[in-house]
Amino acid sequence: MANQKYPVGIETFSELIEEGYVYVDKTEYIHRLIERGKYYFLSRPRRFGKSLLLSTIKSFFEGRRNLFKNLAIDQYPYDWEPHPVFHLNFVNANTSSIEGLHSILIAQISKWERQYGRDESEIDLSQRFYGVIERAVAATGHKAVVLIDEYDKFLVATIDNPDLNRIFRDTLKPIYGTLKAADSFIRFAMLTGVTRFSRLSVFSDMNNLRDISLNNDFAAICGITESEIRHFLSPGVERIAKKLDISFEEAFSRLKQNYDGYHFTSDRTDLYNPFSLLYALEDSKIGDYWFASGTPTFLLEALRSRVGNIRDFFNSEIDDASLGEIESYSDDPTALLFQTGYLTIKGVSEENGDYLLGLPNEEVGRGIFKGILPIFSGMGKDESRNFIRTFTREVKSGNAETFMQFLKSFLSDIPYDLSKNKPEVYFENNIYIICRLLGMEIQTEYRTSHGRIDILMKTDKFIYVIELKLNGTATSAMNQIESKEYTLPFATDGRQIIKIGIGFSKRTRNISRWLISR
């Protein structure tokens, strides 16, 4: 079984090739970009391969043909003449203050000026940026290439801080406006980021900036497909299979369940998260890697601030225009959840052509529900983990009385300010989040021929049919289960059916009484 070196955390193409790391060849897409246009924008979630893509493009335009030996782009008749490349990278920038932005811009432009010179009449940063591009073209005889990695880093980081966000916008606008001003000097330009901020000059001024984020021809420009895993990375899958004492196909299936399922275009090309996949292959372990690398708290808070059934956020519908850009997440965080990788395209509505969104895979599902349980419940992370562990044991054992007592105690600890507006919604949301963390199948408002079951939970051995009566009695809830024959669709299922009628008090924001029937 061949050993492979996986480029975990490596985003520089030259280092990857020269140090012998395995490379999933994406250079055919670079050929398409170069041949079809001049200005591009690509949106993808964080840690999805954007930085490596720009680094690869940088090496190509620097004429470093030795790095591309036996790769797809090497078959095309390019002259491989070096171009001056201006690579502006905001990935690891300090986004907490305007000084962080100024320092990275000054450092980068000063570096280019040491190479190509500076005109003292150029005062502000945008003038200096334009001037250094002009002089580089004059000095080399070749047009310039401009690559901007995570162009929106400062804007996304401060989306919940309008004042600082506005300062960042005002600073970045003239920098990005340089692309239009220097058009005659530019051979190729590409910006990557998480989302489109349409009010930035780069989008409003440059009508020829082509957004390929939802383009089927570039669906797999970042991320890894199943066929690419089998072609380039199968030794790593074999190692996982050997370590877990399972077959190759079973190991592949587990990788798919955890890291596959991303779709960024209407043809729904299946993509694996490269960050998590490469970590799993390196460690020979199915773990949670991407979510652990950082999650914006404001996203999770946005879900809580819009009180409603939490499941609706993970089964959303959105039109093409709304999916591509965002100016605010406060009204509806759906688009930002898609752009940041927590939702993905699951289908296209036959009725109106809108995109249907859902969770991409189990890793994201576990991560996001672990993240939002403390926010919805008010518990600390350690406390929520202990709660999930205990609740799991009781539910999967069919100990309905015990887990109902435990649930009532849990709900009584939710701070008043979290549940005061719609306590019944908070009850349903917490049940939904908990059951998703248990890995259980759960549905709310489950339709039957006679009505809708409030909550339907399924484990390997049990089916729970739960009816909730707000300011009503447990008896009336149980009577509804019986009279509307809610258990009838599961009569031949084989699992034991447990019926629970719950009276819920709006005044106390908690369960008042319950009845259990098997």
Image: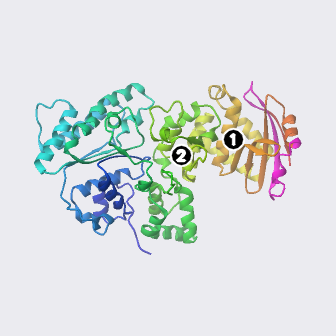
Based on the picture, tell me whether residue 321 belongs to the magenta stretch.
Answer: no
| Range drawn in magenta | 482-511
Q: Position of residue 307 (x, y in %)?
A: 62, 31
Q: In the displayed structure, would residue 216 be above or below residue 1?
A: above
Foreground mark, 2 or 1, reads 2
Which image quarter is the N terminus in?
bottom left
Q: Position of residue 274 (x, y in %)?
A: 44, 56
Q: Position of residue 514 (x, y in %)?
A: 82, 37
Q: CA distance from mark 2 to mark 1?
A: 21 Å
Q: Sort mark 1 into few (<14), some (14-19) or many (20+) by Cα contacts within 10 Å.
A: some
Q: Quadrant of residue 9?
A: bottom left
Using the rendered image of the protein, determine whether residue 91 is visible from the camera's viewpoint. no
Element type at marker 1?
helix
Extreme residue toward the bottom, this view: 1
Image mark for residue 343: 2
355 and 24: which one is in front?
355
What amino acid is found at the position of numbered circle 1 in the picture?
Ile
Q: Sort mark 2 into few (<14), some (14-19) or many (20+) by Cα contacts within 10 Å.
A: many
Extreme residue toward the front, this view: 351
Q: How is the image coloured?
A: rainbow
Based on the picture, tell me whether residue 493 belongs to the magenta stretch.
Answer: yes
Figure label count: 2
Using the rendered image of the protein, determine whether residue 464 is visible from the camera's viewpoint. yes
428 and 124: which one is in front?
124
Q: Position of residue 432 (x, y in %)?
A: 67, 42
Q: In the displayed structure, would residue 14 be above or below residue 172?
A: below
Left/right placement of residue 333 relative to residue 208 reads: right
Q: Are marks 2 and 1 in contact (CB under 8 Å)?
A: no
Image mark for residue 417: none
Q: Quadrant of residue 216?
A: bottom left
Q: Which residue is mark 1?
A: 431
227 and 381: which one is in front?
227
